[in-house]
């Protein structure tokens, strides 16, 4: 008899939906059906039970081909190389549970290396702004139950967070928002007429890269200097700025959701910094909150776990071993790669091969490269060692943090392929092996 | 000959890219989803580019051949978009303004017709960049 | 079978009545016993002071807002000296941070001060798995956490409708779901109001849209607490914290306990614990005529035995304020304009975080410092007045030894007063300069372990009575010859000669030497399932929460080494 598992967490985007229904075959090995999930989530569950999953670590041979090896060999190889390297970097964690992220912290503390997560190339600038200006935010249920004005700025949930608008922001009917979308005003600020802009009440087509100026214009209006605005700011007409600012001021509860459009453009952290300042201004006249549209279902996790472990969310320099250091720009993955400072690279739960600018990939590839990931991806296909692991939310459970820092407990729905380890187990074995080697004086 | 014009390129997520990525980066779906550039029609006209033909995109840090489209999420004149992924990252500048985050959005590129150039697969691009590509 | 005996120390254990008598403490298999065999390992405590492990009744050491504080304040790690490259790693993991230390440093630093238990002061129920993850990564210390109830929509409705049994059943359900120990109340009603940018500053301000007042919320929760007979009482941070003139609101809140007697099997006598009383004992009408209201508040506390308090002593450091009192943090930010974080949590609570510098050159900070010490020095029954800094709000917990020094030495207080730019104004606005009381070691034992343990209903675990866990602190202090230099008192409390956790030496000469298992304590109420409450819970989850009910309760595998305090309700 197939078994239905409810309340399953989806390991795709930062929505971290936890209402997925998965029908599993009698033997617990196959996923037959997936419901309450977006098109992307569906593919993850399908892939999870694919017969093509890699089941053993693979080591690159001198002729460039890959050869299966045992987990034991892979663990020993990784441990020895970590100890040998002067400045190894472990990067990724977009698709790792918190237990794995905590184990990774232990590994890199023993190794004395660098530890970074995908935020470094996504919402890292948001961290920099939060360091400077704080973070007046809320959980997504507050938006659902109270918000009457929603702003998506430089974010496109229709594509990147497919259920965000229906579960949390625009459409749901909450305690004080019983009329759902009808009583909400939606403002989208984006240089493109995105599919999100398509469902908005207002689309401000901003000139790409000029977000800071438009934020500044809104701040002027909120602070009472709207008359001083020029006729157009960042490609947006004064009248439209005044109209939208009025809506913001009169909100009972508003939320700004911002994304890569701000963090990847000129200005970076300064765009977020002024977004936070605007939110602070708005709190003098109304109630406003702000939230980063974190990309992956647990990319919030490493920032949370490493903050309690080391006091910093990313870009960690653990090479001193008795204290941690963080200085984005200096200790950030892409910057270190471009300066050729790293002499070993572990890509875990992400794909730097596909998502780093290619010059950074070329630099990193000069040194030993290990990929820890369930799938074949660009990183695995250029690595010296590829170690497969379980897929969080599919064949291993664990805690993940949603984009609003709410911990969600993920479930395991099928058995992993025989012998495949989860991240936490694998990483702790690598840490144990390093301790053994150190104790024996082999390091 | 056509105009020599600099466009402003951005790279962002798309649901097609998300689905394809989960199917696999070596899949046809991923290739189809990410090896395209979305441009404004006016720019295509000025640059002598026909819809659904290949173009060469060059930036300060590299170049890549992709297929030109208009796309549903319209770009204004002067703006172009390649979906996040392997093709975009051949041209994304790694400079970070000292923040760690590369210049994924808002960097100058030139786009020129290259109707006879072949699109490369993801694997060819990435393995090729690090000297591991052995051919199909 | 492991045996150990601590010989010839001066033992202070108010729970068992030891007042500095020279006595031997015997330990077998991690518990306090009457005697051990002659094979027992011997620790020579001659000339030293022996106490039960310290019990912190109120601190913010784990969970979402503590961690957002760590995340948003990289500069908290930049305090130099021992925090950056100074000390060699003592324990398994590195130690980071000053006012909001990493979990590893939290465990090690408490252990070095002889503490073995902390009570996390505010756990948002929705975010409970986060608190438990941090407990797992905090070494040595036993820990518990209090879920917040003072702005919870379920409680609002049950209290408004006078449904005591349903309220109690919901509370029991939530303690189980979050693995919490007791009822915390923060700015009752005010934090819900803050979700609309408003506040409740007196106990009679109506909560917007909920047709209820803070007074009704507090009374309703006290009633439910005693109906259930929980180990701890309702633990309150009342309305109008931190504002001049609030001592009246504080006394109004304390009066809500009048006529209620504690009902429980754990030896607890109070029905209301008012936390960080310093922040609630302010007179004056503005920051200009701000002065101490400690006398008025302590007069009330001294004469009402069903109340306990902790101090919330300002330590004159740069620190990080954080509380579920969202509107307070917003207003504090309006004063200092440094960065501000806020997290409103659906249906339950909120929180705010603002860095703060208690500068001894600022008059108000000096007066705040005086008020905290006055509370300790006015106290008639020190079992009911506990030492805290509301870590990290009034200062980091690592300053407890300094607070002890101030309470034990008038000379030390004068020395600190002398460093203040507005010393005369501080003296004029308080009574601190005229107070010559100096507390002794027995007083300190009451304020730092026996009193808090009793108030939490945990004195059978955290004391030196037979059967208790062998959590023991041995300080380098000769009780018969206390040093005349108060700095030596602070130094002795900062680093123990020994700290034992369940009979294992975890600190020796101020160094971490072992990291044995620790517990997560929680209150398990055994009572019949309440169909109405289960129905209400299901409905609220399907309509208003964004997390499914089945994923809300902390999964057993995410609770680290759980230890339930059980009680039955018919």
Image (cartoon, grey):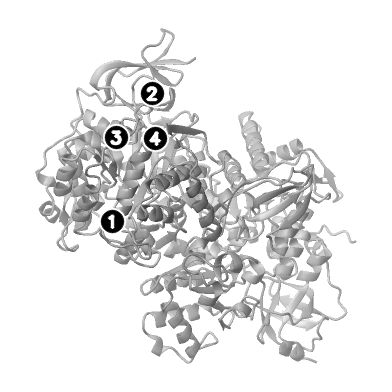
- Looking at the picture, do discs 4 and 3 lie on one chain? yes
Mark nearer the N terminus (1 vs 3)? 1
Where residue C526 sits: x, y (%)? 46, 35
Label drawn at residue C448: 3
Label drawn at residue C468: 2
Q: Which is more toward the observer, C291 or A69?
A: C291
The chain ID associated with circle 4 is C
Mark nearer the N terminus (2 vs 3)? 3
Mark nearer the N terminus (4 vs 2)? 4
- Looking at the picture, do discs 4 and 2 lie on one chain? yes
Q: Eyeballing the image, is C198 above or below C564?
A: below
> What is the secondary structure assignment of the residue under circle 1?
loop
Marks 2 and 3 close (CB-CB < 8 Å): no
Whether residue C84 is visible to the viewer of this picture, yes or no, is no
Residues packed near mark 2 inside 10 Å, few (<14), some (14 to 19) or many (20 plus): many
Viewer-nearest of labels 2 and 3? 2
Q: Marks 4 and 3, Cα distance to the nearest angstrom?
A: 11 Å
Q: Marks 4 and 2, Cα distance to the nearest angstrom?
A: 13 Å
Residues packed near mark 1 inside 10 Å, few (<14), some (14 to 19) or many (20 plus): many
The chain ID associated with circle 1 is C
Q: Marks 4 and 1, Cα distance to the nearest angstrom?
A: 28 Å
Q: Would you name the residue on which mark 4 appears?
A: C117
> What is the secondary structure assignment of the residue under circle 3?
helix
Where residue C372 sits: x, y (%)? 22, 46
Viewer-nearest of labels 4 and 2? 2
Where residue A68 sits: x, y (%)? 83, 42
In the picture, measured across the screen, residue C543 lies left or right of residue B56, that is: left
Mark nearer the N terminus (4 vs 1)? 4
Label drawn at residue C239: 1
The chain ID associated with circle 3 is C
């Amino acid at each position: 008899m197939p078994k239905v598992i409810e309340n399953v967490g989806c390991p795709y985007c930062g929505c971290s939906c936890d209402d997925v229904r998965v029908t599993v075959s009698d033997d617990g090995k196959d996923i037959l059906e997936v419901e309450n999930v977006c098109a992307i989530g569906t593919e993850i569950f399908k892939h999870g039970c694919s017969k093509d999953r890699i089941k053993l670590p693979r080591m690159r041979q001198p002729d460039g081909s890959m050869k299966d090896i045992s987990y034991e060999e892979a663990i020993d190889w990784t441990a020895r190389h970590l100890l040998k390297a002067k400045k190894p970097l472990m990067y990724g964690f977009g698709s790792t549970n918190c237990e794995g992220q905590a184990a990774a912290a232990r590994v890199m503390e023993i190794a004395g290396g660098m530890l970074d997560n995908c935020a470094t190339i996504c919402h890292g600038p948001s961290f920099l702004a939060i360091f400077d200006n704080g973070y007046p935010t809320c959980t997504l249920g507050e938006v659902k139950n109270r918000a009457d004005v929603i702003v998506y700025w430089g974010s496109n949930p229709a594509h990147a967070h497919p259920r965000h608008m229906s579960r949390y922001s625009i459409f749901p009917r909450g305690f004080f928002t019983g009329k759902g979308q009808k009583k909400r005003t939606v403002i989208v600020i984006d240089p493109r007429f995105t599919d999100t802009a398509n469902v908005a009440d207002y689309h401000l087509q901003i000139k790409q890269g000029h977000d800071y100026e438009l934020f500044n214009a809104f701040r002027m209006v909120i602070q009472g200097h709207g008359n001083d605005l020029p006729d157009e700011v960042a490609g947006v007409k004064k009248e439209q700025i005044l109209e939208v600012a009025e809506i913001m001021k009169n909100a009972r509860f508003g939320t700004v959701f911002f994304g890569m459009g701000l963090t990847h453009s000129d200005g970076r952290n300064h765009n977020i910094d002024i977004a936070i300042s605007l939110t602070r201004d708005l709190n003098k006249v109304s109630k406003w909150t702000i939230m980063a549209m974190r990309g992956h279902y647990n990319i919030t996790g490493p920032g949370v776990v490493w903050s309690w472990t080391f006091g910093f969310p990313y870009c960690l320099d653990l090479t001193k071993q008795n204290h941690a250091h963080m200085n984005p720009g200096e200790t950030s993955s892409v910057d270190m790669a471009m300066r050729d400072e790293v002499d070993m690279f572990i890509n875990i739960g992400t794909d730097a091969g596909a998502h780093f600018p290619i010059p950074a990939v070329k630099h990193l590839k000069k040194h030993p490269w290990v990929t820890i990931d369930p799938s074949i991806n660009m990183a695995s296909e250029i690595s010296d060692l590829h170690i497969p692991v379980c897929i969080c939310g599919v064949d291993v459970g664990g805690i993940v943090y949603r984009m609003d820092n709410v911990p969600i407990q993920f479930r395991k729905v099928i058995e992993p392929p025989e012998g495949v380890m989860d991240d936490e187990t694998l990483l702790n074995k690598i840490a144990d092996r390093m301790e053994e080697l150190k104790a024996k004086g082999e390091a | 000959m056509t105009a020599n014009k600099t466009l402003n390129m951005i790279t962002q997520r798309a649901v097609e890219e998300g689905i394809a990525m989960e199917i696999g980066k070596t899949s046809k779906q991923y290739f189809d989803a990410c090896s395209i550039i979305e441009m404004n029609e006016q720019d295509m006209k000025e640059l002598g580019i026909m819809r659904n033909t290949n173009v060469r995109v060059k930036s300060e840090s590299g170049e890549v051949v992709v297929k030109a489209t208009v796309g549903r999420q319209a770009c204004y004149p002067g703006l172009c978009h390649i979906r996040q992924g392997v093709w975009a990252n051949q041209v994304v500048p790694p400079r970070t303004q000292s923040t760690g985050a590369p210049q994924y959005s808002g960097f100058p590129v030139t786009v020129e017709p290259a109707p006879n150039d072949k699109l490369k697969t993801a694997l060819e691009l990435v393995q090729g960049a690090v000297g591991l590509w052995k051919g199909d | 079978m492991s045996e150990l005996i601590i010989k010839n120390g001066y033992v202070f254990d108010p729970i068992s009545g030891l007042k500095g008598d020279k006595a031997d403490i015997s330990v077998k298999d991690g518990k306090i016993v009457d005697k051990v065999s002659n094979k027992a390992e011997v620790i020579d405590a001659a000339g030293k002071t022996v106490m039960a492990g310290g019990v912190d009744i109120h601190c913010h050491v784990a969970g979402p807002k503590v961690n957002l504080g760590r995340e948003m304040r990289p500069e908290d790690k930049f305090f130099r000296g021992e925090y950056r490259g100074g000390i060699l790693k003592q324990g398994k993991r590195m130690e980071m941070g000053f006012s909001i230390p990493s979990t590893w440093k939290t465990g090690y630093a408490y252990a070095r001060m002889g503490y073995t238990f902390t009570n996390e002061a505010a756990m948002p129920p929705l975010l409970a798995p986060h608190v438990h993850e941090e407990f797992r990564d905090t070494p040595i210390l036993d820990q518990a956490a209090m879920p917040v109830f003072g702005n919870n929509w379920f409680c609002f409705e049950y209290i408004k409708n006078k449904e005591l049994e349903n309220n109690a059943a919901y509370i029991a359900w939530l303690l189980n779901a979050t693995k919490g120990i007791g009822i915390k109340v923060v700015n009752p009603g005010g934090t819900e109001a803050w979700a609309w940018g408003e506040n409740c500053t007196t106990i009679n301000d109506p909560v917007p849209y909920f047709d209820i007042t803070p007074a009704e919320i507090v009374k309703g929760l006290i009633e439910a607490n005693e109906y259930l007979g929980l180990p701890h009482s309702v633990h309150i941070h009342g309305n109008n914290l931190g504002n001049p003139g609030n001592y009246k609101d504080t006394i109004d809140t304390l009066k809500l306990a009048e006529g209620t007697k504690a009902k429980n099997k754990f030896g607890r006598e109070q029905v209301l614990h008012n936390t960080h009383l310093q922040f609630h004992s302010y007179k004056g009408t503005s920051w200009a005529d701000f002065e101490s209201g400690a006398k008025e508040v302590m007069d009330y506390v001294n004469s009402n035995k069903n109340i306990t308090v902790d101090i919330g002593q300002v330590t004159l450091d740069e620190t990080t304020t954080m509380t579920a009192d969202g509107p307070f943090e917003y207003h504090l930010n309006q004063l200092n304009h440094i960065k501000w974080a806020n997290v409103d949590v659906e249906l339950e609570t909120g929180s705010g975080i603002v860095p703060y510098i208690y500068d001894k050159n600022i008059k108000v900070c000096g007066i705040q410092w005086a008020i905290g010490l006055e509370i300790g020095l006015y106290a008639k029954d020190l079992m009911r007045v506990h030492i805290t800094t509301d870590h990290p709000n009034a200062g980091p917990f690592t300053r407890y030894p300094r607070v002890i020094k101030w309470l034990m030495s008038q000379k030390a207080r004068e020395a600190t007063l002398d460093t203040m730019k507005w010393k005369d104004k501080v003296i004029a606005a308080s009574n601190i300069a005229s107070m010559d009381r100096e507390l002794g070691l027995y007083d300190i034992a009451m304020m730092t372990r026996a009193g808090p343990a009793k108030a939490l209903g945990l004195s059978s675990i955290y004391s030196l009575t037979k059967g208790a866990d062998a959590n023991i602190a041995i300080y380098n202090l000769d009780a018969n010859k206390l040093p005349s230099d108060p700095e030596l008192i602070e130094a002795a409390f900062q680093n123990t000669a020994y700290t034992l956790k369940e009979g294992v030496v975890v600190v020796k000469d101020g160094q971490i030497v072992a990291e044995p298992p620790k517990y997560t304590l929680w209150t398990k109420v055994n009572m019949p399932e309440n169909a109405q409450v289960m129905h209400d819970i299901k409905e609220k989850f399907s309509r208003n929460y964004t997390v499914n009910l089945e994923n809300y309760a902390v999964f057993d595998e995410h609770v680290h080494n759980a230890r339930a305090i059980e009680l039955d309700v018919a």
